[in-house]
Amino acid sequence: MQWLIVISFLTTLLFGLILAYTSFGRYTYAIGSNPEAARRVGIHVDRHLILVYGVSGLMAGLAGIMNLAYFSTTTISGHPLDNLVVITAVVLGGASLFGGRGSMLGTFIGVFIPETLAAGLIIAGVNQYWQYILTGVVLAAAVYLDQFRRRLRERA
Protein backbone atom coordinates (compact mmCIF):
# COMPACT_ATOMS: atom_id res chain seq x y z
CA MET A 1 0.00 0.00 0.00
CA GLN A 2 2.92 2.38 0.58
CA TRP A 3 3.79 2.21 -3.12
CA LEU A 4 0.35 3.54 -3.99
CA ILE A 5 1.01 6.60 -1.83
CA VAL A 6 4.45 7.10 -3.41
CA ILE A 7 3.02 6.79 -6.93
CA SER A 8 0.21 9.23 -6.09
CA PHE A 9 2.61 11.73 -4.58
CA LEU A 10 5.09 11.52 -7.47
CA THR A 11 2.30 11.85 -10.05
CA THR A 12 0.91 14.89 -8.26
CA LEU A 13 4.35 16.46 -8.01
CA LEU A 14 5.19 15.75 -11.65
CA PHE A 15 1.98 17.21 -13.06
CA GLY A 16 2.09 20.12 -10.63
CA LEU A 17 5.52 21.04 -11.97
CA ILE A 18 4.38 20.52 -15.56
CA LEU A 19 1.38 22.80 -15.06
CA ALA A 20 3.40 25.46 -13.25
CA TYR A 21 6.60 25.58 -15.31
CA THR A 22 6.00 24.44 -18.88
CA SER A 23 4.31 25.83 -21.95
CA PHE A 24 1.94 22.84 -21.78
CA GLY A 25 0.70 24.11 -18.41
CA ARG A 26 0.43 27.72 -19.55
CA TYR A 27 -1.47 26.67 -22.66
CA THR A 28 -3.79 24.50 -20.57
CA TYR A 29 -4.64 27.41 -18.25
CA ALA A 30 -5.05 29.76 -21.22
CA ILE A 31 -7.43 27.40 -23.00
CA GLY A 32 -9.35 26.80 -19.79
CA SER A 33 -9.72 30.51 -19.23
CA ASN A 34 -10.69 31.52 -22.78
CA PRO A 35 -10.26 29.10 -25.69
CA GLU A 36 -11.00 31.72 -28.34
CA ALA A 37 -8.36 34.10 -26.98
CA ALA A 38 -5.88 31.20 -26.82
CA ARG A 39 -6.65 30.36 -30.45
CA ARG A 40 -6.11 33.98 -31.47
CA VAL A 41 -2.64 34.12 -29.92
CA GLY A 42 -1.54 31.07 -31.88
CA ILE A 43 -2.19 28.14 -29.58
CA HIS A 44 -3.44 25.07 -31.46
CA VAL A 45 -6.42 24.58 -29.16
CA ASP A 46 -7.83 21.41 -30.72
CA ARG A 47 -4.46 19.65 -30.75
CA HIS A 48 -3.75 20.72 -27.18
CA LEU A 49 -7.15 19.53 -25.97
CA ILE A 50 -6.49 16.13 -27.52
CA LEU A 51 -3.24 15.98 -25.52
CA VAL A 52 -5.03 17.04 -22.33
CA TYR A 53 -7.76 14.42 -22.82
CA GLY A 54 -5.11 11.80 -23.60
CA VAL A 55 -3.25 12.59 -20.38
CA SER A 56 -6.58 12.53 -18.54
CA GLY A 57 -7.32 9.07 -19.92
CA LEU A 58 -3.84 7.89 -18.96
CA MET A 59 -4.36 9.15 -15.41
CA ALA A 60 -7.80 7.52 -15.24
CA GLY A 61 -6.20 4.23 -16.27
CA LEU A 62 -3.50 4.65 -13.61
CA ALA A 63 -6.18 5.41 -11.02
CA GLY A 64 -8.09 2.28 -12.05
CA ILE A 65 -4.98 0.12 -11.71
CA MET A 66 -4.19 1.65 -8.32
CA ASN A 67 -7.79 1.18 -7.20
CA LEU A 68 -7.65 -2.47 -8.19
CA ALA A 69 -4.30 -2.88 -6.42
CA TYR A 70 -5.71 -1.37 -3.22
CA PHE A 71 -9.08 -3.17 -3.09
CA SER A 72 -8.06 -6.39 -4.93
CA THR A 73 -11.46 -6.36 -6.64
CA THR A 74 -13.65 -4.08 -8.68
CA THR A 75 -17.31 -3.53 -9.49
CA ILE A 76 -19.12 -1.25 -11.87
CA SER A 77 -21.14 0.38 -9.09
CA GLY A 78 -18.36 0.39 -6.50
CA HIS A 79 -17.75 4.14 -6.34
CA PRO A 80 -20.94 6.10 -6.95
CA LEU A 81 -19.67 9.34 -5.39
CA ASP A 82 -16.18 9.55 -6.86
CA ASN A 83 -17.07 12.23 -9.42
CA LEU A 84 -18.85 14.33 -6.80
CA VAL A 85 -15.95 14.00 -4.36
CA VAL A 86 -13.38 14.92 -7.01
CA ILE A 87 -15.29 18.00 -8.17
CA THR A 88 -15.77 19.09 -4.56
CA ALA A 89 -12.06 18.62 -3.82
CA VAL A 90 -10.93 20.56 -6.89
CA VAL A 91 -13.29 23.49 -6.24
CA LEU A 92 -12.40 23.58 -2.53
CA GLY A 93 -8.75 23.56 -3.60
CA GLY A 94 -9.22 26.84 -5.44
CA ALA A 95 -9.86 25.77 -9.03
CA SER A 96 -12.63 27.58 -10.84
CA LEU A 97 -15.40 25.65 -12.54
CA PHE A 98 -15.10 28.19 -15.33
CA GLY A 99 -11.44 27.41 -16.05
CA GLY A 100 -8.17 29.26 -16.01
CA ARG A 101 -7.54 29.01 -12.25
CA GLY A 102 -6.26 26.36 -9.91
CA SER A 103 -3.17 24.51 -8.82
CA MET A 104 -2.09 20.99 -8.01
CA LEU A 105 -1.19 22.04 -4.47
CA GLY A 106 -4.64 23.53 -3.92
CA THR A 107 -6.28 20.39 -5.27
CA PHE A 108 -4.00 18.22 -3.12
CA ILE A 109 -5.12 20.16 -0.04
CA GLY A 110 -8.74 20.25 -1.22
CA VAL A 111 -8.85 16.44 -1.40
CA PHE A 112 -8.56 16.21 2.36
CA ILE A 113 -11.77 18.16 3.07
CA PRO A 114 -14.34 15.76 1.51
CA GLU A 115 -12.30 12.76 2.67
CA THR A 116 -12.24 14.07 6.23
CA LEU A 117 -15.96 14.78 5.97
CA ALA A 118 -16.65 11.24 4.73
CA ALA A 119 -14.50 9.67 7.46
CA GLY A 120 -16.18 11.79 10.12
CA LEU A 121 -19.65 10.87 8.88
CA ILE A 122 -18.75 7.18 8.90
CA ILE A 123 -17.34 7.44 12.44
CA ALA A 124 -20.48 9.31 13.55
CA GLY A 125 -22.61 6.50 12.11
CA VAL A 126 -24.46 8.68 9.62
CA ASN A 127 -26.56 6.76 7.11
CA GLN A 128 -24.89 6.44 3.68
CA TYR A 129 -27.86 8.21 2.05
CA TRP A 130 -27.24 11.29 4.21
CA GLN A 131 -23.52 11.12 3.47
CA TYR A 132 -24.35 11.62 -0.21
CA ILE A 133 -26.57 14.57 0.61
CA LEU A 134 -24.02 16.23 2.90
CA THR A 135 -21.27 15.81 0.30
CA GLY A 136 -23.57 17.45 -2.24
CA VAL A 137 -24.25 20.33 0.17
CA VAL A 138 -20.51 20.88 0.60
CA LEU A 139 -20.12 20.91 -3.20
CA ALA A 140 -22.98 23.39 -3.57
CA ALA A 141 -21.40 25.64 -0.94
CA ALA A 142 -18.03 25.41 -2.71
CA VAL A 143 -19.62 26.36 -6.05
CA TYR A 144 -21.42 29.27 -4.39
CA LEU A 145 -18.15 30.51 -2.89
CA ASP A 146 -16.46 30.13 -6.29
CA GLN A 147 -19.19 32.26 -7.88
CA PHE A 148 -18.93 34.81 -5.08
CA ARG A 149 -15.14 35.10 -5.50
CA ARG A 150 -15.56 35.44 -9.24
CA ARG A 151 -18.09 38.26 -8.89
CA LEU A 152 -15.81 40.09 -6.45
CA ARG A 153 -12.91 39.77 -8.90
CA GLU A 154 -15.03 41.10 -11.77
CA ARG A 155 -16.04 44.17 -9.75
CA ALA A 156 -12.43 45.08 -8.97
Image (spheres, rainbow, N blue to C red):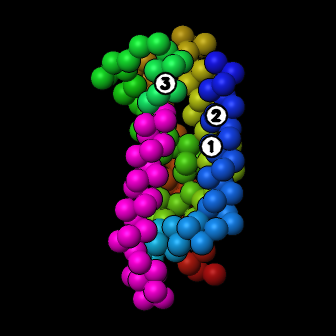
> Which residues are drawn in magenta?
36-63
Camera-side residue of 153 and 25:
25
Binning the other alpha carbons within 10 Å of mark 3 as few (below 14), some (14 to 19) or many (20 upward) gives some
Camera-side residue of 50 and 107:
50
The residue at the point 33 percent across, 18 percent down is 75
Q: Report the residue marked by disc 1.
A: 11
Q: Position of residue 124 (x, y in %)?
A: 59, 13
Q: Is residue 14 above or below residue 4?
A: below
Judge depth for marks 3 and 2 and give the one in front.
2
Q: Report the residue marked by disc 2.
A: 7
Q: Report the residue marked by disc 3.
A: 67
Camera-side residue of 83 and 68:
68
Secondary structure, mark 1, is helix
Residue 111 in view, yes or no = yes
Binning the other alpha carbons within 10 Å of mark 1 as few (below 14), some (14 to 19) or many (20 upward) gives some
Q: Position of residue 141 (x, y in %)?
A: 52, 47
The residue at the point 44 percent across, 30 percent down is 64
